[in-house]
Amino acid sequence: MVQKRNVVSILLPTWNEQETLPLVVWHIHEACTERLVDYELVIVEDNSDDGSLQVAQKLQGIYGSSRLVIVARKGRLGLFSALVDGLLKATGDYIVVLPANFTQHPKYIPHLVAQQEATQADIVASSRFGDDHNGVCGWSFGQRLQCCVKTVLADLLFSLRLSDPTSSYRLYKRQVFAQLVHALGDTRTADSACHLGLAFAVAAQSMHCTVAEVPVTAMQPVYSDKDDVALASVGRFAVHAIGLYLRQ
């Protein structure tokens, strides 16, 4: 009897990612086909003004509509609602959330899948930290400092069972992801990947989800944050984290 392989739905929210989108999609396809991961890619396009939707449509013509699904939205509606709409279109047994700006490499998707199969964890999180961390590549001092401060703050407030609570690059069991989305409701304060990563991590801990980790190397984004906005970024994260803490 042939064992049924689980399908992995990769949610890729996009806004003005026409340059990185072909590269990200190609690496997803290469990584998954090489490691025999049965996948579908759900691109949630937030009405970009740089032609990202047209690029996605061309890619759909290359990879096929059964492999690449497009959710074209009529405005920039935000990251959380993009994940909700992506989940509604996804058919997979597992959900992977992947940034579209190529700060996280798609090559780790098979590693997330393998770790889930080995541990049966509800969530498999990527980690730039931990005992066997791979860290970051090409980040400025300001970016490294931001990340460290946010991670320390999250640990102080929540004592999470994650070494990298601000990373949104994770694999979820489908039903767990749906439960987390329902628990978070309309998370308007989660306007960035790291904010949303923390919100999901806090909700997962309150639901007693089991978690495993995979070490990854994060990369410099195509459009990088400048160091002079580091303080503002940390401030916004602190407001978001304290808000989550008070709502517990």
Image (cartoon, grey):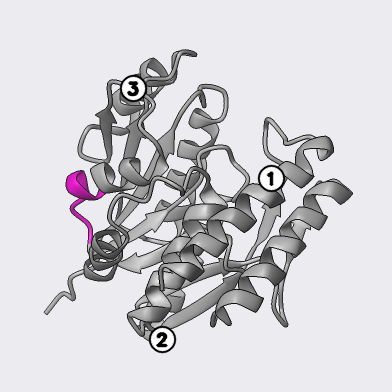
27 on left or right of 119: right
Whether residue 169 is visible, yes or no, is: no
Q: Examine the image and state in which quarter residue 232 appears.
A: top right
Q: Position of residue 148 (x, y in %)?
A: 76, 63
Q: Residue at x 55, y 77 (%)?
A: 158
Residue type, label 2: Thr
Q: Is residue 151 above or below residue 196?
A: below
Mark 3 / mark 1, whichever is N-terminal: 3
Q: CA distance from mark 2 to mark 1?
A: 35 Å
Residue 89 included in the magenta stretch of the image: yes
Q: Is residue 236 above or below residue 111?
A: above
Residue type, label 3: Gly
Q: Residue at x 30, y 49 (%)?
A: 186
Q: Position of residue 228 (x, y in %)?
A: 83, 36
Mark sitting on residue 75: 3
Q: Residues within 10 Å of mark 3 (few under 14, many from 20)?
A: few
Q: Residues within 10 Å of mark 1 (few under 14, many from 20)?
A: some
Q: Position of residue 106 (x, y in %)?
A: 52, 51
Mark 3 / mark 2, whichever is N-terminal: 3
Q: Residue 85 versus residue 38: which sits nearer the camera? A: 85
Q: CA distance from mark 3 to mark 1?
A: 24 Å
Residue 232 included in the magenta stretch of the image: no
Q: Regarding mark 2 in the picture, which secondary structure is present there?
A: helix
Residue type, label 1: Ser
The residue to which callout 1 is attached is 233
